[in-house]
Structures are given as structure tokens and as C-alpha cells.
Image (cartoon, coloured by chain):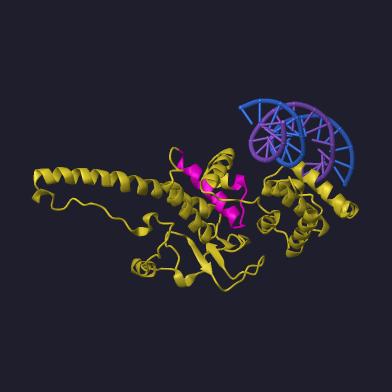
Chain colours: A yellow, B purple, C blue
Amino acid sequence: MENKLDSVETVKKRSCTFCGSKNLIQNKNSGELVCNSCGGVLEDNLVEQSASRRAFSFEEKQRKERTGSPLTYTKHHRGIVTRIGSKNMDKMSADKRGRYHRMKKWDRRLSGSKPRNMRLALSEMQRVVEDLNLPKRIHEESARLYEKAWEIEVVKGRRVENIVAALIFLVCRMQNVPRTLDEVAEAAEVERTEVGRNYRYVARELDKRVVPAKPEDFTPRFASSLDLSGRTRGKARQIIKDVREKGLIAGRSPEGVVASALYIASVLEGEKRSQKEIAETVGVTEVTIRKGYREFAEELGVLEELEDAREL
DNA sequence: AAGACGAAAGTGGTTGA
DNA sequence: TCAACAACTTTCGTCTT
């Protein structure tokens, strides 16, 4: 059962064309069909298809949504809140009432400040997660880490948006569904450098070791936004693999590697995309693609083949 | 007009003394 | 903590198709 706040829905009839997983989710806001395992986008601009879930009246809507949410980290306090109420105040003695007031005050301070912060963070997180089309498990883990970060006072004195963005970036990378700094920054409406800085900070504080993103983890997504075929996608993967074996990716940014590999693959497979197009979707400059693809093609011995293919 | 090229100067991150 | 360093970006003029 999905959290009803999410406008995403699991789709079981199909499997992912990138990794074969049957675990797909559909984002009803953006109309995209996304793989919950690899993060690949299978289709975008889908129209609402799930007629069975549509509600035609208020009662029907209520009935269909009434099934409760499971315990979830994506809802602050997992739906369980205890408060000191104000019933029967007038029946108390003045002394007792005073103590009661103090208790209430502290209750508000202790349990009050946390939910307020959490509520803000989680709704922001909800927004960003949807914007980036991230799988549910990433949302869950990010929310869990936010709570943890809050508890060890990592959040204190920092903007909620920054921490949220940093955590999402971190979790995406840990779960091999990487998003670029630029993508997260844009979705979270935070400066890129802030995402980077806070990401390192929370990773250190939460004691998370994070390995650099693997270029091939980016290929399905970028290939699909560039509308490239499976063949070309496979070719790009192969190029990245070969180039890694030759020790050429050390020190290079994963984005630069993907962009270069996609360029080479697209040209060789006769589905050429311009450097500019690729540069824009991946978020690197054309210069980076040029340097990368020249070196790669040369090392792999496909430079001539590439030049020839480009003529067409 | 569009795509590719590369020079040159600037930026941010990593590393090692 | 500073300085050196490589990768990357930005900008821009040039060449080709």
C-alpha cells in the first residue's frame, strides 16, 4: 500500500527495459513510468491509465483512500503523536495548574519543535523526491536519515532545504540510483555548491561512506531522455566498461564519462546526438565531451570509425 | 545557421607538505 | 592551513557542412 500522500503508484504488469526489474512506479504528477530498482525512465508524458483506482464521487474517493498508511518514516512521527491536553484544567488546584502549565510548556518545546521541523523537512522532501522521480525506498531512507540527523543535532543551524537536498543526493548515490548535483540542486531550489558542501557534511556526521557514482548508473536515464535505442545504450555501457579497464576514468567526473560514452555510442550506432544536446541533458559542457570522447575513441581504437560515421 | 573545434582564463575539489 | 594540481567550466573566435 502506498502512502496516500504520494502521487505515485506501483505498476506490476511490466518489467523494466533497462534492468528487467518488475518493480516499477508511476508518478501521476509528471506522468513518468520509472523503475524502482535502477531509476530508469521508461515512459514519460503518460496519461492517467489506472481507471480502477479512479474515484467518481467523494464517497468512492474516501473508500478507496481510507486504507491506512503503514508505519512509515516519510510521515513525521509515523502518525503517532502524544500531547498533554488541556481538559479538566478548571478542576485542578492553583498549584497543580501551575505545574501543569510548566509541563505543557516543556511538552510543547520538546515534542513541539521537532515535529515542526520534521513536518517542514518531510514535505519539502516529498516535493523534491517527486520532482526527481525517485523510488520509494530512496524517499524512505532519506526520511529515516533526516530523523537520525535531527536527533544527533546535525540539522541545527542549517537550512532545512539544504539538509534535505544533501540527504537525497547522498541516499541516491548510496543506492546506486545517482542524480547529479545539478539535478538535485534544481529540484530542491538550492545552490549546487550548497548541495555539495552539505552532502559531505551530512555524510561525515552520519558516518556514511560513499563511493563515487558509477558512470553506468547514469546511462539508462540520460539515454532515455536523449531517446536513444537499447542498442546504443548497450554500446555506451560497453564503452564505459572498456574505458574503465584501460584506467581512463580515474579522476574523471562520472558525468563527463557518461556524456562522452553516449556521444561515441550515438554516433557509432547511427543515432547521432549533437555534443550540445548531450552536454545539456547530462549537465557537462561540450568541451568536456570533446576531451573525453577524443581520448576514449583513441584508446579504444575507434577514432577512425567514429570520424567516418559522423560524415553520414 | 548549426555543429564541432580548441585556446585561454577562471572555478572548485583533492592532495600532500 | 596553504599551495600545487588536474578536471571542469565559461567564453569566444574559427572552421566546416
Horizontally, residue A12 falls left or right of residue B15, namely: left
A107 vs A208, nearest the viewer: A208
Look at 79% across and 51% down and name the residue there.
A247
Q: Which residues are magenta?
A: A158-183
Horizontally, residue A183 falls left or right of residue A265, namely: left
* Quarter of the rendering containing residue A62: bottom left
* Secondary structure, magenta segment, majority class: helix
* Quarter of the rendering containing residue A221: bottom right
Query: Is residue A271 inside the magenta stretch?
Result: no
Horizontally, residue A254 falls left or right of residue A51, namely: right
Look at 33% across and 58% down and name the residue there.
A80
**Residue A102: percent from the left, percent from the top?**
21, 43
**Residue A290: percent from the left, percent from the top?**
80, 44
Quadrant of the drawing holding the N terminus of chain A: bottom left
**Residue A100: percent from the left, percent from the top?**
18, 46
A151 vs A119, nearest the viewer: A151
Residue A34, above or below A287: below
